[in-house]
Image: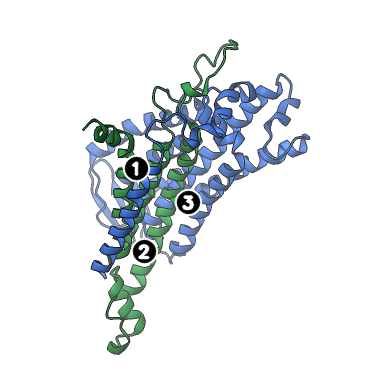
């Protein structure tokens, strides 16, 4: 099987290699890919949408349908992970574990015992030994807010610099996953629960879809943001710019939430406990 | 010798793509471990992304953000000054979708592991058939 596969790959690779001589040179400005529709995009983006970043304008406006369904695909992937892995919550465990934060001692409380009240001195953990590294915790606590701020900048400044909903959303999701890796899954789900990440994921898709439907209600086509110009202070061109911004925010929310949701299910094998 | 040099400079991106595609496809065909197959699939996706992005390149052009786009200046925009933005848009979404599909693939692998206790393809096949030696495909 291995040898057969290798022979097939060598034949296939040789065929591909022989085709490369027919393909346009690297950096050829007159290649078919660069002469058909892309000159229109580059030359008309500014007057159509007043967005200097052509990539953002194509992503959310010219090819808005594509991006809408890509967002739906990402949400479906999150949903698929949920249905594949999620295990319904088991019955109340025999014993609960709490960590005394200042000393690092672990308390084991049997069923019927007195459970510590919500306080800053005790933290509930999932098993008798959950690593608690002060250096890693403090470093991530310093880094995470700046990563999140950078993610918001990437989303909000996507019109004028490289960036947008997908990139910013992934960075924001990575910041939350970094927090989950450096602390534990329980303290992360306390801040962003699984339910709210699922709701945010669908909410992001609904923001995108709702913008398109709002454009229909206002008398323009689906995802034709110039319909938003009925709002005061907007002309059709700047309305497109704002429409792109709303859509990018929706994409950013959806991507963030789905990344976190997939991580929760994968890292804990569906139990939403312990984690990595 | 100069022609060979110019040929290499003109086509080396495609050769890198071909090498990556071959590695990814080989991993998907020949490896028995499911996680290695998933890694092969990701290498294949990376090759496609490299192919698209390298098609968008133009010599002497800059990144597709229109200069002086913030003021009201109505200067002409020449398409030759900016690289092709379309492949970048397509790959932007493809990267994020590939991460999401990677998550689904890993979730499936996890379920298979819980069910059969292994990720090796031939061992899974044995457990499906039920350890009857005459039914096992010897080539697999």
Please give the name of the residue rendered at 27% of the width and 71% of the height, measured from the top-left corner.
A1
Q: Which residue is mark 3?
A: A194
Tags 2 and 1 on a common chain: yes
* Nearer the observer, A19 or A108: A19
Which numbered tag is attached to residue A206? none
Letter of the chain that mark 2 sits on in the rendering: B
Q: Residues within 10 Å of mark 1 (few under 14, many from 20)?
A: many
Q: Nearer the viewer, mark 2 or mark 1?
A: 1
Tags 2 and 3 on a common chain: no
Give coordinates of residue A21: x percent, y percent.
35, 43
Using residue A104 as the reference point, say whether residue A123 is left or right of it. Answer: right
Q: Residues within 10 Å of mark 2 (few under 14, many from 20)?
A: some
Using residue B63 as the reference point, say whether residue A233 is left or right of it. Answer: right
Q: Colour of chain B?
A: green
Q: Quadrant of residue A92?
A: bottom left
Q: Which residue is mark 2?
A: B109
Q: Quadrant of residue A120?
A: top left
């Amino acid at each position: 099987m291995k040898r057969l596969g290798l022979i097939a790959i060598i034949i296939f690779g040789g065929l591909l290699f022989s085709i490369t001589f027919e393909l346009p040179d690297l950096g050829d400005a007159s290649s078919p890919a660069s002469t058909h529709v892309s000159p229109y995009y580059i030359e008309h983006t500014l007057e159509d949408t007043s967005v200097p970043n052509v990539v953002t304008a194509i992503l959310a406006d010219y090819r808005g349908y594509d991006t809408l369904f890509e967002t739906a695909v990402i949400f479906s992937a999150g949903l698929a992970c949920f249905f594949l892995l999620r295990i319904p919550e088991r019955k109340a465990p025999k014993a609960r574990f709490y960590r005394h934060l200042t000393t690092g001692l672990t308390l084991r409380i049997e069923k019927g015992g007195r459970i510590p009240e919500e306080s800053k001195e005790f933290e509930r953990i999932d098993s008798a030994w959950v690593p608690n590294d002060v250096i890693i915790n403090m470093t991530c606590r310093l880094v995470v807010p700046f990563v999140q701020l950078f993610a918001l900048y990437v989303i909000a400044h996507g019109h004028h610099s490289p960036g947008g909903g997908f990139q910013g959303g992934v960075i924001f999701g990575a910041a939350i996953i970094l927090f989950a890796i450096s602390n534990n899954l329980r303290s992360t789900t306390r801040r962003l629960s699984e339910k709210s990440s699922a709701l945010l994921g669908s909410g992001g898709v609904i923001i995108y879809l709702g913008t398109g439907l709002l454009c229909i209600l206002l008398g323009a086509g689906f995802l034709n943001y110039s319909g938003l110009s009925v709002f005061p202070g907007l002309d059709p061109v700047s309305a497109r710019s704002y429409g792109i911004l709303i859509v990018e925010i929706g994409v950013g929310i959806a991507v963030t939430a789905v990344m976190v949701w997939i991580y929760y299910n994968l890292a804990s094998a569906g139990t939403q406990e312990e984690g990595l | 010798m100069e022609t060979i040099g110019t040929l290499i400079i003109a086509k080396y991106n495609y050769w890198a793509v071909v090498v990556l595609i071959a590695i990814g496809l080989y991993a998907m065909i020949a490896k028995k471990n499911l996680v290695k197959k998933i890694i092969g699939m990701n290498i294949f996706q990376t090759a496609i992304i490299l192919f698209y992005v390298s098609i968008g390149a133009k010599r002497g052009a800059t990144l597709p953000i229109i200069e002086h786009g913030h003021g009201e200046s109505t200067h002409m925009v020449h398409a030759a000054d900016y690289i092709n933005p379309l492949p970048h848009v397509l790959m932007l979404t493809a990267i994020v979708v590939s991460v999401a599909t990677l998550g689904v693939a890993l979730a499936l692998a996890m379920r298979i592991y819980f069910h059969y206790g292994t990720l090796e393809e031939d061992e899974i096949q044995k457990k499906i058939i039920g350890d009857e030696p005459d039914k096992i495909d010897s080539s697999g």
